[in-house]
Image (cartoon, rainbow, N blue to C red):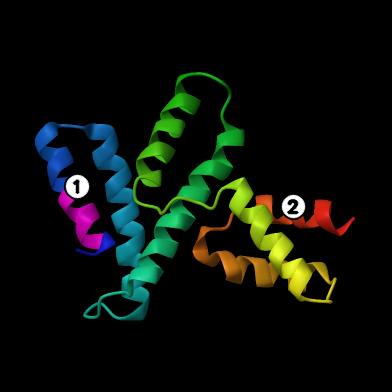
Amino acid sequence: MGLKDRIQDDIKTAMKARDAIRLSVLRMVLADIKYQQAQVDLRAELPEDVVLKIVGAYQKKLTKSLDDYPDGDAKSALLGEIKIVDEYLPQKATEAQTKAAVTKILGSTADRNFGAVMKLVMTELGGLGDGRLVSQIIKEQMT
């Protein structure tokens, strides 16, 4: 079962359970997926990695909007939405895994160009690397 199918099934489950918040979040994610699919071809299914990127982009959009809300009910509701979206994303690499990847890349290459090292580390971690954490660790280890 693909991620899109899982989201559609969870929408049905949320409808039956009358979970309005979960239903709303999942509908928004599905709308983003369908919008992207319409941009390519309505009849063709999107590859799983593209669907994963769309869900990740939605989660990133929610995370960025956290700064716009003052502490209180609205911010806690937004955190709840982020938690729902996180269930559909793979776990990010831990700080120890990230440090190990940075150390490995810095040890195997003589290139000390930040952008090139960043690209190699993100490739090494696959889609599981957190860009901010990777950037911070590279800066620490290169100085």
Distance between the alpha carbons at the discs numbered 1 and 2? 37 Å
Q: Name which residue lies at 54% across and 53% down.
A: 93
Residue ID for mark 1: 10
Earlier along the polypeptide chain: callout 1 or callout 2? 1
Numbered badge on residue 137: 2
Give yes or no for residue 5 being in the magenta stretch: yes
Q: Which is the main secondary structure of the residues drawn in magenta?
A: helix
The magenta stretch is 4-10
Image spot of residue 17 (x, y percent): 13, 33
Of residues 38 and 80, the one drawn nearer to the viewer in this rendering: 80
Residue 46 x/y as whole percent: 31, 74
- Pointer 2: residues within 10 angstroms few (<14), some, or many (20+)? some
Residue appearing at x 32%, y 43% in the figure:
25
Residue, x 45% and y 20% (percent of image)?
73
What amino acid is found at the position of numbered circle 1 in the picture?
A: Asp
- Please, what is the three-letter code of the amino acid marked with disc 2? Ile
In screen coordinates, is 35 left or right of 111?
left
Across and down, in percent, residue 112 comes to 85, 71
Q: Name the quadrant of the N terminus.
A: bottom left
| Other residues around mark 1 within 10 Å, as few (<14) / some (14–19) / many (≥20) | some
Decide: is 73 above or below 83: above
Q: Secondary structure at mark 2?
A: helix
SS class of the residue under badge 1? helix
What residue do we see at 41% from left, 28% from top? 77
Query: Left or right: 2 with respect to 63?
Result: left
On screen, residue 50 above or below 73: below
**Residue 101 visible to an observer of this rendering:** yes
Asked if residue 1 lies in the magenta stretch, the reply is: no
- Quadrant housing the C terminus: bottom right
